Amino acid sequence: MAEGLFSDQLWTSAPRCVKVRAPGKINAFFQAGPLRADGYHAVASTYLAVSRYEEVAVTARPGTPATAITVSIGPGSSLSPQALAGIPLDTSNLAVKAALLVAEIAENPSGVHIEITKHVPIAGGMGGGSADAAATLVACDALWHTGLSREELSQLGAELGADVPFALLGGAAVGLGIGDELTAALAPTPLHWVLVPADFGLSTPLVYGALDTLRADAGIVAEEPVQVEAGVLTALRASDPQALAPWLHNDLQAAALSLAPSLTPVLAKGTELGALASLVSGSGPTLAFLAADEDHARQLAAALTDAGHEAWAVEGPVHGAAIIQ
Ligand code: ATP
């Protein structure tokens, strides 16, 4: 009886909570131009959202001001405690920044608590922080009834980082500008991939810096990228992994490998074990291996695990940030 009473009390006094799931991403194709005067690099990127998700639960804290935003890491997170310790739990957390942006628009918002269940590697080149920001934008919009359109959420997201609009959109998309000018790409059937996370992170600005240095040392003057290779989009439209394999490309790969040479033999191992193609995801250090189909991805993940590497079979493209509860 006491238990029933407790449940009833919980039911009537439970604070409102919205839970959102947002995907990590890989870049099937990535070209970066030279360093611009504003500190950015223009890019031509093909983003793919993959089935490795962040979960963000935003709970109202009635009676507290909108600035009373707290954040914690959920106990269901699958990353190592050491990795999780690298996440800031103050206003520099991208999820907190996202909540503050929506609070500026909402009428009478309360404070909130944000719980992030992390599954996407930190500083892993998979846009995990961006996924948290995207999920928080969607959750706060629902919690505070701000009624923002996807386009408006995307504009807010772009203020937080170039990858946030894509985490909202999901699927497959071409990103131009600094990656935030998105056009959805057709990819009717998901492809199968194996991801190998690293037990360290790589700072994106550091990787871009290494790219600029490598180019300067080699006397290469990079051109401004204009568009992604058509072959990538044709292969995605056909959902044809064999056709996509030769088009996978990442300008940041050599720079990431120069900073983290231990990744090179792992890339080679994936190819040796039968991956159709292997590449560094975004600014790394997560590695992405293309498989022929779901069974092949499972076998490849098992073989990489046997070889001593953590490996996840995933599919992509998948949907962008979506409310799950
Ligand atoms: P991208 O590919 O978009 O450059 P990434 O996946 O390489 O991103 P993130 O995991 O997004 O990198 O995190 C980069 C840094 O951002 C971290 O080292 C951390 O200090 C900071 N950060 C801020 N908020 C978060 C968050 N919610 N989760 C993870 N890192 C965060």
Image: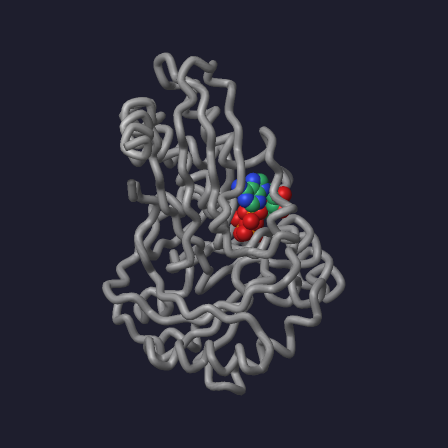
Residue lying at the far left of the rendered structure = 188
Say left or right for 186 vs 227.
left
Residue lying at the far front of the rendered structure = 1
Please tell me how many numbered marks the rendered image carries. Answer: 0
Say left or right for 15 vs 90.
left
| Residue at image point 72% right, 66% down | 218
The answer to whether residue 12 shows anywhere in this view is yes
Which image quarter holds the C terminus? top left
Residue lying at the far right of the rendered structure = 217
Percent from the top left, x then y, of residue 320? 33, 48
| Residue at image point 44% right, 42% down | 164
Q: Which corner quadrant of the image does residue 102 belong to? A: top left
Give the answer, above or below, for where 103 lies relative to 239: above
| Residue at image point 50% right, 86% down | 273
The foreground one among 157 and 72 is: 72
The foreground one among 258 and 58 is: 58
The foreground one among 79 and 156 is: 79
Say left or right for 275 vs 263.
left
Give the answer, above or below, for where 146 lies relative to 318: above
Q: What colouring method underlies this structural image?
A: one colour
Percent from the top left, x then y, of residue 132? 46, 42
The answer to whether residue 36 shows anywhere in this view is no
Give the answer, above or below, for where 302 lies relative to 288: below
| Residue at image point 53% right, 87% down | 272
Which image quarter holds the N terminus? top left
Percent from the top left, x then y, of residue 7? 30, 32
Give the answer, above or below, for where 271 lies relative to 251: below
